[in-house]
Image (cartoon, grey):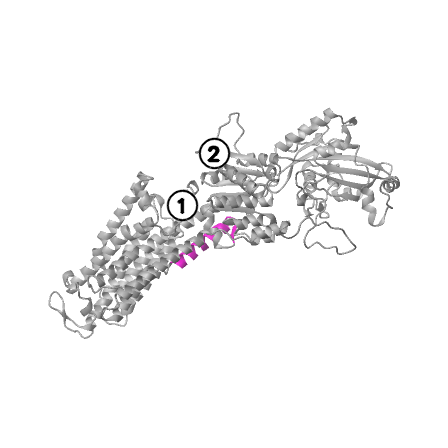
């Protein structure tokens, strides 16, 4: 008994859940029960609580903001309850609550996530939930499988070793097709479990053996016209026994009934498997027309060649041949060796009870799973974006290293060795995870954490299900945002423990149900492409919020002027709804379609700046932009009221008598008396003129918000939806000037606003806003990473 524990999946006897003997009887060996089984382990890992996603984090932040707004408004309502004319007080407080509440936010988030989902779908990535679309751009670690997402999943024959010569398939001609070559190809066709559709050599109906199907299809590429049809070949060589390939003996053995040159029935035995296993069972080797003894020196040459092919990332299978004589003699031989009578249920056991040694070595066929052509570029983009790449596979280290070199994860071999430093750890390395399989789980986790800290990228070969889960969990505990690509049932626990679970198209049902994203083309490059879309979503959402939040300052100052200065100015509730949905929401949706102003895949993931609402955004929207918009509103209000006869000094402490319906003799600065009906009409015009001023300033702010740092003219105006939004705001200003506020439509004579006077009053503030924001962006480009960027770059 060896000290190394045998894997349950590698055992010859295996007890599986939901395995039934539907006829006859059978024996089973249960290796584990409950949580100690593979299904129990995966179930326990799959039901662990998932990491919070980016959208959940933003929802929590927005909830805090709404709670703060509601608390402040309730406190202000409680403090202002003692004022006279309570109905007006309640209307003013409700207008403030509506103005500060982001009613537009759910619509912006939905539209942005929907837009990103459509963009990802066009790039062959299906979004199953909005969690993955928002969190993917924040990923700092991508854990991917090696075979499937980075390779084409189509094995190709690359080299053939026959007659002591290694032939390249690309340079293979008809002259190289010797009798030994044809014999090797025939053995590869017969000794496999592939089922081919009748009459169609190139389309597999059911692929049981990967190598058999590959070699069948390869016959067409070789152009072996002197070979019979595949179906006829298999009919002439009836398969009477088959020992399937297992990971323990690493060989497949088949026995076929055929006829010799004289038409007599005979049996032949074919063997396929690992080169070191097959070659130990061979005693001779045929070279052209001569059969030579397979001595130790010749075995070493063949094994060294096989090792070289394995290091190059090839799957190598050796083939051997043996004649068993006629069928009657074979049956007598099998009965003597097994003590069983031939025929009946023991037929196939009798056929395989033969001496599988003293075979003739035919040669080797090397197959290659080529990497996708887009993977090297995707790996470079992934590294430039600051994303750590961890590749896991159950293949051996040599195979994993060869594929990793082809796709660019591992650097080309050099003669010099560079020791790691604190600033630059090991670039990448291949780690055999099977070396840690016998250690305790806590020790394996410690090794995994140390490997993650020591290497920028990592290739893990021989990885088990538990180790894959521990890798994803270790990355998450070290503070990384993890995206895991899986395609089998065993990948489900790791996908559940990650922030974003990504499944390949056509994978296991359980794996697909646990995924947030599905790669329709099963390519790693597709996932890297949609990372930029997720990052663009976050950038455009912040632009949309910066645009919408700029009106909050105006609402706050209007509220303060009403209660602290007593100025009879407030925005009606209907106007607040128009401001929230028509002025803020509709143009903000156009900002979601804004193209990136710079290459987002050259930026580091903003893990420590993952806040949809941050202090810099509030500073720019409320202080820099909001104060200018509020100044424009107040200037428009005072100019309009002065034109009607109320100078600014006469408006102070006028809010209480202004809303007293019993007073009909309020005089302005020129001695004119204003009745209650006239004041209501004037108040409607004031509300409309203030809404027009906010709309005009927001129109200017909308164009400026297109970029956060880039030059506006250099960025261009390719977003035609934003141009339509600007035109919409201009038409809204004209419409408000014609019909006043919606609450005043029932009054006669209220549409007396002059659009020219309005523009003459507001254009200096528009110019000031343009100069301020253009200057700020200029200095941001001129002095990157300066204090200005720390304060204003949201």
The quadrant of the rendering that contains the N terminus is: top right
Disc 2 and disc 1 in contact, CB within 8 angstroms: no
Residue 237 in the image: above or below residue 100:
above
* Residue 395 on image: x %, y %: 62, 39
Residue indicated by mark 1: 608
Residue indicated by mark 2: 425
Specify the segment rendered in magenta: 105-127
Q: Which secondary structure is most common in the magenta stretch?
A: helix
110 within the magenta span: yes
Along the line of sight, the residue nearer the viewer: 715 or 137: 137
Question: Could you tell me which secondary element the residue under label 1 belongs to?
Answer: helix
Asked whether residue 452 is in view, the answer is yes
Q: Earlier in the sequence, mark 2 or mark 1?
A: 2
731 within the magenta span: no
- Crowding at mark 1 (Cα within 10 Å: few <14, some 14-19, many 20+): few
Farthest left residue? Answer: 671
* Residue 554 on image: x %, y %: 27, 58
Q: CA distance from mark 2 to mark 1?
A: 22 Å
Q: Is residue 144 left or right of residue 229?
A: left
* Residue 17 on image: x %, y %: 67, 53
Name the residue: 68% across, 51% down.
16
Residue 751 in the image: above or below residue 20:
below
Question: Could you tell me which secondary element the residue under label 2 belongs to?
Answer: loop
- Residue 459's mark? none
């Amino acid at each position: 008994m060896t000290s190394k524990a045998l894997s349950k999946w590698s055992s010859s006897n295996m007890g599986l859940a939901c395995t039934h003997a539907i006829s006859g009887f059978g024996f089973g060996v249960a290796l584990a029960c409950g949580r100690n089984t593979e299904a129990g382990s995966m179930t326990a890992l799959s039901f662990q609580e998932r990491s919070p996603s980016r959208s959940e984090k933003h929802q929590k932040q927005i909830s805090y903001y709404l709670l703060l707004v509601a608390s402040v408004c309730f406190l202000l309502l409680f403090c202002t309850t003692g004022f006279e004319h309570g109905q007006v007080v309640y209307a003013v407080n409700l207008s403030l609550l509506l103005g500060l509440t982001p009613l537009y936010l759910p619509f912006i988030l939905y539209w942005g996530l929907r837009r990103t989902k459509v963009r990802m779908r066009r790039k062959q990535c299906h979004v199953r939930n909005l969690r993955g679309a928002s969190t993917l751009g924040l990923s700092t670690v991508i854990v991917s499988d090696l075979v499937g997402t980075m390779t084409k999943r189509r094995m190709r024959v690359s080299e053939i070793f026959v007659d002591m010569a290694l032939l390249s398939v690309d340079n293979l001609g008809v002259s190289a097709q010797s009798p030994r070559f044809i014999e090797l190809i025939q053995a590869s066709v017969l000794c496999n479990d592939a089922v081919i559709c009748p009459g169609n050599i190139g389309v597999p109906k059911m692929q049981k053996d990967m190598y058999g199907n590959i070699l069948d299809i390869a016959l067409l590429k070789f152009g072996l016209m002197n070979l019979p049809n595949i179906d006829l070949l298999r009919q002439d060589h009836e398969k009477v026994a088959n020992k399937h390939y297992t990971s323990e003996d690493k060989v497949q053995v088949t026995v076929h009934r055929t006829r010799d040159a004289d038409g007599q029935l005979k049996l032949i035995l074919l063997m396929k498997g690992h080169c070191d296993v097959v070659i130990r069972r061979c005693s001779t080797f045929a070279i052209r027309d001569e059969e030579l003894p397979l001595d130790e020196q010749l075995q070493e040459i063949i094994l060294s060649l096989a090792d070289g092919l394995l290091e190059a990332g090839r799957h190598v299978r050796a083939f051997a041949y043996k004649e068993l004589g006629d069928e009657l003699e074979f049956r007598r031989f099998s009965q003597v060796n097994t003590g069983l009578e031939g025929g009946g249920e023991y037929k196939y056991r009798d056929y395989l009870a033969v001496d599988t040694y003293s075979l003739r070595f035919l040669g080797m066929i090397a197959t290659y799973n080529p990497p996708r052509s887009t993977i090297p570029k995707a790996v470079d983009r992934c590294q430039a974006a600051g994303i750590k790449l961890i590749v896991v596979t159950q293949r051996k280290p040599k195979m994993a290293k060869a594929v990793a070199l082809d796709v660019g994860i591992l650097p080309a071999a050099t003669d010099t060795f560079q020791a790691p430093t604190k600033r630059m750890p090991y670039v990448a390395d291949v780690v055999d995870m099977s070396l840690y399989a016998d250690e305790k789980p806590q020790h394996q986790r410690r090794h995994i954490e140390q490997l993650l800290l020591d290497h920028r990228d990592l290739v893990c070969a021989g990885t088990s299900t538990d180790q894959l889960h521990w890798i994803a969990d270790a990355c998450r505990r070290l503070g990384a945002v993890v995206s895991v690509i899986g395609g089998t049932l065993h990948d489900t626990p790791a996908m559940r423990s990650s922030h974003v679970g990504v499944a390949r198209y056509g994978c296991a049902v359980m794996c697909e149900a646990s995924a947030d994203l599905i790669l329709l083309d099963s390519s790693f490059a597709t996932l890297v492409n949609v990372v930029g879309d997720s990052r663009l979503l976050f950038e455009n959402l912040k632009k949309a919020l910066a645009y919408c939040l700029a009106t909050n300052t105006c609402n706050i100052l209007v509220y303060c002027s009403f209660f602290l200065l007593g100025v009879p100015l407030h925005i009606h509730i209907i106007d607040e709804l128009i401001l929230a949905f028509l002025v803020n929401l509709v143009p903000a949706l156009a900002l979601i379609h804004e193209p990136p102003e710079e290459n987002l895949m050259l930026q580091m993931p903003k893990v420590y700046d993952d806040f949809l609402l941050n202090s810099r955004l509030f500073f720019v929207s409320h202080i820099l932009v909001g104060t200018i918009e509020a100044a424009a509103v107040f200037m428009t209000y005072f100019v309009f009221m002065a034109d009607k006869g109320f100078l600014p000094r006469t408006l102070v402490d006028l809010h209480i008598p202004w809303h007293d319906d019993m007073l009909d003799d309020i005089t302005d600065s020129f001695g004119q008396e204003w009745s209650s009906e006239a004041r209501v009409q004037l108040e409607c015009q004031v509300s409309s003129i203030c809404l027009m001023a906010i709309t005009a300033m927001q129109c200017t702010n909308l164009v400026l918000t297109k970029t956060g740092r880039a030059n506006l003219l250099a960025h261009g105006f390719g977003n035609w939806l934003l141009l339509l939004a600007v035109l919409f705001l201009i038409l809204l200003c004209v419409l408000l000037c014609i019909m006043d506020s919606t609450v005043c439509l029932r009054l006669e004579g209220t549409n007396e606003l002059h659009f020219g006077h309005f523009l003459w009053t507001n254009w200096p503030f528009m110019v000031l806003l343009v100069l301020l924001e253009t200057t700020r962006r200029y200095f941001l480009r001129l002095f990157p990473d300066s204090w200005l960027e720390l304060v204003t770059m949201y």
